[in-house]
Image (tube, rainbow, N blue to C red):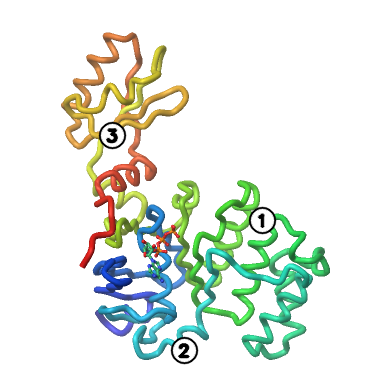
Amino acid sequence: MSDREAAALAIDVRGLNKHFGDKHVVRDVALQVKRGEIFGFLGPNGSGKTTTIRMLCGLLTPDSGSGTCLGFDILRESEQIKREVGYMTQRFSYWDDLSIRENLDFVARLYQVREREQVVTKSLEDLGLAQRADQLAGTLSGGWKQRLALAACLLHEPQLLLLDEPTAGVDPGARRDFWEELHRLAARGISVLVSTHYMDEAERCHRLAYIASGSLLAQGTADEITNSLKLATFCLTGPGLAGLADKLLGQPGVEQTVAFGSAVHVSGTDADALKATLERVAAERGLKVEPIRTSLEHAFIYLMKRAPKENGHA
Ligand SMILES: Nc1ncnc2c1ncn2[C@@H]1O[C@H](COP(=O)(O)OP(=O)(O)OP(=O)(O)O)[C@@H](O)[C@H]1O
């Protein structure tokens, strides 16, 4: 890769491995995140997302692997990385009995931010927190707490944000606002790697990676990931759908069924066999069957079901 291409990458790592005791929790992970890109990091609980993020920002040393974060070597230059990265942990800690402004002021002191007062005031304005600047953090709702957390990790003007499930437990309106803010930051050239369990958030990322049991199973745009699986998906609607999803499993061509209230989505890689099965079932039961686009949600359910169940040892 040329220097120019490398400079266009905020994160460029390969062969990352991490064990905890005899548990191999991150396996040969390679990630490339472009500058100014919002990169989604998805995977079931315990799949290794937090561990990977901590290795990227120099908080954890990989057992093996190499690469750069913002052009700094992840093994030798972790101090520089920490200075240029904003890391929002799953449980952001703020001080309940300090106001929003006092919390930000405190964090700005930790980072030794110059012209602290102006920086804090600007941050309050940029993040829409000015009206609540004097409210005690402990009295804020989940959405406002996340906003405070984001403001805090932006104070030292990082080039890259590593956000670990920043919107867990936050209501849909506040999540939408949070994502608008992420897109504004990305438009300013800030790179974002964000882990999430929400499909609507995954759809809003420029590119994504899916990790299960420590291994990356897919990486690319939403379309690249869904197309790579070569899944055909059909939607069944009509009367008496209860229990149908389970009954279909195991029939020719049927690899995955997902029940929704008023429909069952059925996917498989052998489109002809799947179609034949569904047309037969639809005729028998008086249902309607139609092909639909394989969504990111279908793709991730498919990947998750095929991933090894446990983190293996070794
Ligand atoms: N310090 C540690 N010591 C021992 N095991 C750990 C440690 N940190 C994480 N693990 C284990 O490593 C595995 C991966 O954890 P990690 O937190 O990276 O997953 P995750 O994908 O971020 O999960 P979640 O979505 O639940 O946050 C889990 O089995 C976890 O129990």
Give the Cα separation between the discs numbered 3 and 2: 46 Å
For label 2, the residue is: 80
Local crowd size for mark 1, using a 10 Å CA cut-off: few (<14), some (14–19), many (≥20): many
Residue 143: image tag: 1
Local crowd size for mark 2, using a 10 Å CA cut-off: few (<14), some (14–19), many (≥20): some
Q: Which one is in front, 57 or 9?
A: 57
- Total numbered labels: 3
x 49%, y 47%: residue: 200
Where in the figure is residue 255, as x and y percent of width and height?
A: 23, 34
- Mark 1: is the Cβ under 8 angstroms from ligand 1? no
| Above or below, 286 relative to 73 | above
Q: Quadrant of residue 35?
A: bottom left
Q: Amino acid at mark 1?
A: Gly
Which numbered disc flags the more N-terminal residue, 3 or 2? 2
Q: Which one is in front, 60 or 227?
A: 60
For label 3, the residue is: 256
- Mark 3: is the Cβ under 8 angstroms from ligand 1? no
Q: Mark 3 near mark 2, Cβ–Cβ under 8 Å?
A: no
State left or right for residue 248 relative to residue 114. left
Q: Amino acid at mark 3?
A: Gln
Q: Quadrant of the C terminus?
A: bottom left
Q: Quadrant of the N terminus?
A: bottom left
Which numbered disc flags the more N-terminal residue, 3 or 1? 1
Which numbered disc flags the more N-terminal residue, 1 or 2? 2
Mark 3, secondary structure of its residue: strand
Give the image quadrant in which the ligand numbered 1 is located: bottom left
Where in the figure is residue 139, as x and y percent of width and height?
A: 77, 60
Where in the figure is residue 181, as x and y percent of width and height?
A: 61, 62
Residue situated furthest front in the rendering: 21
Local crowd size for mark 3, using a 10 Å CA cut-off: few (<14), some (14–19), many (≥20): many
x 33%, y 70%: residue: 32
